[in-house]
Amino acid sequence: MPIRVTRSVIPSLFTSMNLFCGFFAIVKAANADYAAAAWLIVLGGIFDALDGAMARLTNSSSEFGVELDSLADVVSFGAAPSFILYQAFFHQWSTVGVVLASLPALCGALRLARFNVQLVGFDKDYFRGLPIPSAALVLISYLVFFHLPTGAASYIPEPAKPAILVAITIAVSLLMVSTIRYDTIPKLNMSGIRKNPSKAIGLLVGIILIAVTRGGAIFPLMALYLLFGVGRQLVVISRRSGDDDDEDMEEEEETPFDV
């Protein structure tokens, strides 16, 4: 009986490459090649973005694709970054290190499960909670470009590095299961550029900066993205508290684990 190949296979191939990158990143981290592991996470993120683009291009978005994408993401952007963090630093802290390193994987899995059960349609203007690929990029870019370098290559004093890494790990993990809104990546096509020209320009500028700095700009750019979502949420909260009787006030968000 011949195997039937449908157009939905195309985005699934990109998703599978994302999963492979996550697995290969774990292999590289096990051999203490953290720079290669970090770039494999970045490559996985590119495949993760392309599988959605291919699904729209081939008109083959499906629940199967969503589930496969989440399974790949929990490996590439959850388990792999957690293992990289543990192998590169947290292994020194025994059980406490295991717990801290596991937070991105645990919170990432919770965030993906919540996303899947709340998914309505495939095109959204924002995510609820920090997307797990963004969280992974924040963690691995800080680790590789700011935590691990020593001497003149590091901008951070050695005594401060452990506390900063712990703070970033916990903050990123909690933001994934929060209800803070984060903008989706704009589509780099004519309709996407016309809809959000400022976002599209910002994305292109960011890609150029990352290329010019050979990856060094990833953490500062991702940190800005992270802080922008937090700052916007604080503005919304302050407006709500200042005008409790506003009839147009947005209804209260669900708690982090409501489904």
Image (cartoon, grey):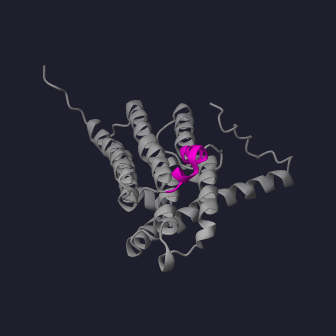
Residue 189's image quarter?
bottom left
In this picture, is 248 found above or below 67? below
Question: In this orientation, does residue 119 appear?
Answer: yes
Whether residue 53 is visible: no
Residue 102 x %, y %? 54, 43
Residue visible at 65% across and 49% down in the picture: 180
- Judge left or right: residue 96 versus residue 221: right
Q: Locate residue 193, reporting x and y percent.
A: 44, 61
Q: Nearer the viewer, residue 87 or 7?
A: 87
Task: Identify the image quadrant of the C terminus.
Answer: top right
Q: Relative to 200, is 163 on the left or the right? A: right
Q: Give the quarter of the figure containing the N terminus.
A: top left
Residue 128: percent from the left, percent from the top? Answer: 60, 45
Which is more toward the observer, 57 or 119?
A: 119
Q: Give the range drawn in magenta.
A: 89-102
Is residue 90 magenta-colored?
yes
Instruction: Report the magenta stretch's main SS.
Output: helix
Residue for point 67% across, 57% down: 230
Residue at the (47%, 58%) spot, across then down? 140
Q: In this view, does 227 lie above or below 217?
A: above
**Which residue is nearer to you in this view: 251 or 12?**
12
Q: Which residue lies furthest to the left in this view?
A: 1
Q: In the depicted view, which residue is nearer to us: 209 or 80?
A: 80
